[in-house]
Amino acid sequence: MDMLITSCILLGMFSFAAETTSPLDSWVFADDPISMNWLSVQCGLRCLLEITKPWMDDSIWNEPFQESSNYEYADDHRMGREDLDPELADLCDITDTTTEETNPYHWPLRMLCPLLRIPRHKCGASRITNFMGRLLPDFVNLLAAKEPRALLIMSYWLALMCTSVDEWWVGPRVTLECRAICMYLEACGDRRIIELLDFPARSCGYKVTS
C-alpha cells in the first residue's frame, strides 16, 4: 500500500512540473483536455486514500495525512458565507443558506479563504497543496469549461502557491497558469472579475492594463 501511495504522490508531482514557461501553453488557451491533466491527476490521491482508509493506520503516510487533515479548513462544511471573502462570495452568488451541494464554488472558497488570511511566511506547502487534491468533480468541470468565476478562484490558489511554496516542481507551473488565467480573465472584460485580479496578478508578475 505504501508503495502505491508513494507512486501516486510522485506521479502527481511529476505531472504538476511544467515543461514550458509560456502562459500561452496553458490549458486556458488550449482545446485539448489533456492539457489540464496536471490538475486532474491530483484528484487521484484522494480516491486512493478513500479506498485504502481501512489500512491507513499501518501506513508510513498516516501521520503526515493526519496532520494535513487537521488544518482549520479541512472539514469546514458549514452552510452560508460566514468567514468567506465577501467579494468572492458575492461574485459566486453565495448566500447565508448556500451549501456545497447547491453551489459548486462554495467548497473551494471554504478551503481557500482561511489560506488567504494566513501570513505568507506561515503557509506551509502541505497546507496549500491540499487544496487541489480536495476539489470536487463539479468544480473541476467548471475549470475545464473555463468558467470565469472558477478560474478566478483557481488564480487565487495559484497566487498563494506563487508566494508561499518554493519547490522545484511548483514554481514554473503556478506562475505560467496564474498568468494565463489573468490574461484570459482580463480579455473576458467582466469588470467585477477584473477588479478582483489584483492579488493573483501581483503574485505572478502580470500587469493588468484594463
Image (cartoon, rainbow, N blue to C red):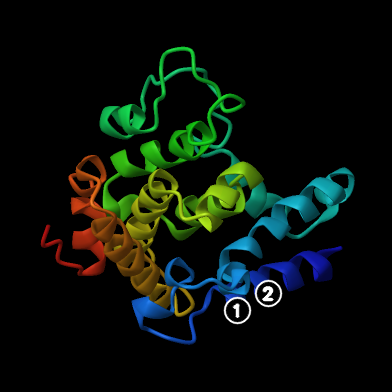
Number of other residues with Cα within 10 Å of mark 1, as a class: few under 14, some 14 to 19, many 20 or more: few
Nearer to the camera, 196 or 119? 196
Q: Which residue lies furthest to the top in this view?
A: 97
Residue found at x 39% / y 47%: 153
Nearer to the camera, 195 or 76? 195
Asked if the residues shown at circle 1 and circle 2 are in contact, with their CB atoms under 8 angstroms apart, the answer is yes
Q: Is residue 107 positioned above or below 152 on the image? A: above
Q: Is residue 15 positioned above or below 210 on the image? A: below
Q: Which amino acid does label 2 sit on?
A: Leu
Number of other residues with Cα within 10 Å of mark 2, as a class: few under 14, some 14 to 19, many 20 or more: some
Q: Which residue lies furthest to the left in this view?
A: 209
Residue found at x 39% / y 65%: 165
Residue 192, given in percent of the width and then of the height, sits at 23, 40
Residue found at x 26% / y 45%: 193
Residue linked to disc 1: 14
Residue 125, given in percent of the width and then of the height, sits at 45, 60
- Left or right: 33 as drawn, with respect to 119: right
The part of the image, by quadrant, that contains residue 159 is bottom left
- Left or right: 209 as drawn, with respect to 104: left
Q: Is mark 2 on a helix, strand or loop?
A: helix
- Left or right: 145 as drawn, with respect to 53: left
Residue linked to disc 2: 11
Q: What residue type is labelled 1?
A: Phe
- Left or right: 11 as drawn, with respect to 83: right
Residue found at x 32% / y 62%: 184
CA–CA distance between discs 1 and 2? Answer: 5 Å
Nearer to the camera, 16 or 59? 16
